[in-house]
Amino acid sequence: MTPSPPQKKRFICTKTYFNSKTMFARTVRQISGVARNSRMQGCAACLRRQFGIKPVEHKRFPLRYLGQPSPFTHPHLLKADEVTPGLTQTEYALRRHKLMSLVRQKAETLGSSEQAVIVLSNPTYYMTNDIPFPFHQNTNFLYLCGFQEPDSILLLHSHPGSSLASHRAVLFVPRRDRSRELWDGPRSGVDGAVALTGVEEAHNTEDFRNYVQKFKEEGCTVWYDQESVAHPKLHQDYLEPLVRVKSSSENRIQPVRTLIQSLRLVKSAAEVRLLTTAAGITSEAFINTMASSKVPVEESYLYAKFDFECRAGGADFLAYPPVVAGGNRSNVLHYVKNNQTIKDGEMVLLDGGCEYFGYVSDVTRTWPINGRFTGPQSELYQAVLDVQKSCLSLCMPGITLDGIYAYMLALISKKLSELGIANAGSKQLDVYKGARKLCPHHVGHYLGMDVHDTPDMPRSVPLQPGMVLTIEPGIYIPEDEMSVPQKFRGLGVRIEDDVLVTEEGPVVLSASCPKELLDIQEICLRS
C-alpha cells in the first residue's frame, strides 16, 4: 500500500534493540531455523541485564469453546502454550514487562511511585443496523495480551515500592451471556481469559469501575491514550471521570501509544516467522492471479482471484482493500473501486496483501494483461525495477527510510532523464521536482501488525535488525500529462516488496513474487 506523502520530521528515541548476534539467513528455510534459536528483542534499559521471565504458569483451559481459538479447541492451529498461533504466553508476558520497564524509566522524571497502564480493545463496528463488520482488534491491545474479543480492557498496574518493572496484568472482559452467545458466538469469560492469555487475573468489564477509583490519587500516574480513544463507549462509561480528575492534577495522564509502538517497531523471531508466511502466501497469490490474466478482464475478477488465492493459501483475510487498477487508473494511488474493464494492451497495477494470524503483508506488482509488455511499458517498468532494487540494497542497520527516500528521488530523476521524460540539462532542483511530481509518495513504511505499522515512529529512525518495512518506488504518468512524451502517457508502474533488516543485509520476504520482465511475461502467458 502506498505510503503517505513525506511529513515533517519528528525526533524520538526508540528505546529498542534486536539481538545483534542473531544471524538471519536469506531464505525462508534458513530464517525459520535461525528464528527457533533466537532471543526476543529487548528494550534499551535492559542492555545491562537479561530479562528473567519464567514460562507463564499453565492454567487449565475450560472444556468449551472460547471467544477465539485455543489449544483445546484448535490444536491444529495452536500449541499448548500459545495465545495466538506462533506467539506464546511467555512472549506476551515479556512484551508487557518491557513496556512497564519503559514506563518506569519515564516515571522517574514524574516523581510518581505507582503506575497504571490502561489499553482499550476495539468495539464492534456495524455496517448497518445489527449487521457487524468482521471484528478487528486494536493492535496495541492485541500486541500486549493476544485477547481478541471486543469491549475489553487491559490494565498493567505496577507494585508500589517494588524494583524495576514488577507489575500485575489484569484483563476486564465481557461477561458470559447465554442470550448474546446464542447470536454472537461464545465468550471466553474471566476463566477463559486467564487460561488463554496467562494474565494474573481477569474480571468482567463492568468491574473496572471499581478499579479506576484508586487511580485518581495524586501518587498514581495513569498511562492512557485519551487523545486517540480506541473504544469511545468504554472511555465514556469508565474513563471520562478519571480524565477529568487528572486534568486538574499535577500528575496528568500520560500517553502510552508511542511507548508501545517503540516496542512493536523491532520484531521478535516469532513475529518474523509470521510475517514471512504472510509474504509467502501473498507472493503465491500474485503468481496465480497473473496466470489467470486474460483479454479483456474485469478488475473485479482479479480482485476476487487474489482474495481467493490468499485465503486458500492460509490467510485469514486481506490486509486492506486491494488496488486493482488497469490502464490510466494506475495513476490514482489508492484506487479501490476495481470496477472497470482492463483492455488489450493495458497494464494492471495490483497492490495487495493478506493478514496471517495478526501479521500482514503488502506487495505491489504491475504487469501487462495480455502477457506482453510494449516497448514504452517495458522501458518504464525496467526503470522502476532498477530503482527498487537499488533502494532494497540500502535496507541495512543505520540507514533511515528518509535517507532511502532521498536516494530514490535521485535515482528516479536520473531515470526520467534517460527516458527523455525530463530534460537532462535542467537544473537539479527542477529535476527533483519532476521526480516528486511523478512519484508523489514516500519510498516505504514500516510493516507488522498493521499495514502502515507504528505510525508514530518517524522515518528518520535508524534502521535496526528486526525491523520490517516496504520498499515501493513508482512512476505515474497520467494520460493528460502533456509535458511527457506521448508513448508514456497513461502508464503507471509501482513495484513493492516486504523486507527484513538484518546484520548481514536485507532479506526480501516477498522474494518469491516474480518481478523481472521475462518472468512476469512467462507467467502471464500461461493463461
Image (tube, helix red, strand yellow):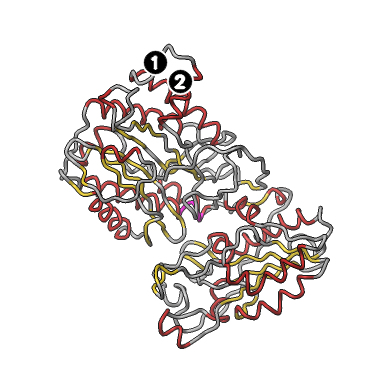
For the residues labelled 1 and 2, the Cα–Cα distance comes to 8 Å
Does the magenta portion include 519? no
| SS at badge 1 | loop
Residue 410: x %, y % from top left? 47, 24
What amino acid type should be assigned to the residue bearing mark 2?
Val
**Left or right: 355 with respect to 14?**
left
Determine crowd level at label 2: few under 14, some 14-19, many 20+ residues with C-alpha closer than 10 A.
many
Residue 390: x %, y % from top left? 43, 29
Mark 1 and 2 residues: CB-CB less than 8 Å, in contact? yes
The answer to whether residue 18 is above or below residue 231 is: above
Q: Which residue is mark 2?
A: 431
The quarter of the picture where the C terminus appears is top left
Q: Quadrant of residue 420?
A: top left
Determine crowd level at label 1: few under 14, some 14-19, many 20+ residues with C-alpha closer than 10 A.
some
Write down the region rendered in magenta: 270-274
Q: Which residue is mark 1?
A: 423
At a point 38% along the width and 22% down the height, the residue shown is 416
Q: Main secondary structure of the magenta part?
A: helix
Residue 138: x %, y % from top left? 53, 62
**Left or right: 231 with respect to 421?**
right
What amino acid type should be assigned to the residue bearing mark 1?
Asn
Q: Quadrant of residue 385?
A: top left
At a point 24% along the width and 48% down the height, the residue shown is 340
The answer to whether residue 526 is above or below residue 245 is: above
Residue 91 appears anywhere in the view = no
